[in-house]
Amino acid sequence: MLRGGSGRRCAGLEFCAAWATLSRRQIDVALKVSAGLTSKQIARLLLVSYQTVAKHRQAIFRLLGVHSVAELALGIAAAGLGDTLSEL
């Protein structure tokens, strides 16, 4: 098992290896997206533009190899990273 970006043990080799490449900001955005927040809500929370969040989402989906919010949330849960949602 690898360690995810937050230092927690991570199950699911491919997802965890990709997760470890994300920046701290990308991890923040990924967790918020998987929790069901919209890009507009995330932008307000992080004090950035909607376009910045949209670019982060594109990069996250590409790097993790997911195509939907549901896939992202499942990947996070399956990798054992779901407890990082408390960091929101």
Image: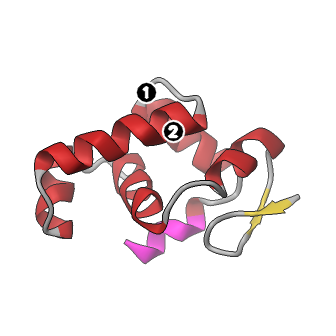
Q: Which residue is mark 2?
A: 72
Report the span colored magenta. 83-88
Query: Which residue is found at the position 47% from the left and 34% from the top?
Result: 61
Indicate the quadrant where residue 8 lies. bottom right
Q: Main secondary structure of the magenta part?
A: helix
Disc 2 residue type (three-letter): Leu
Count of marks overlaid on the render: 2
The N terminus - image quarter: bottom right
Q: Marks 1/2: CA distance?
A: 6 Å
Query: Which residue is found at the position 63% from the left and 60% from the top?
Result: 81
Where disc 2 sits, the SS reads: helix
Residue 56: x %, y % from top left: 34, 46
Residue 34: x %, y % from top left: 42, 47
Disc 1 crowd rating (10 Å Cα; few below 14, some 14-19, many 20+) is few
43 above or below 62? below
Q: Is residue 85 part of the magenta span, yes or no? A: yes
Q: Which residue is situated farthest in the right direction here? A: 1
Q: Which residue is mark 1?
A: 68
24, 28: nearer the viewer: 24
Q: Is residue 81 part of the magenta span, yes or no? A: no
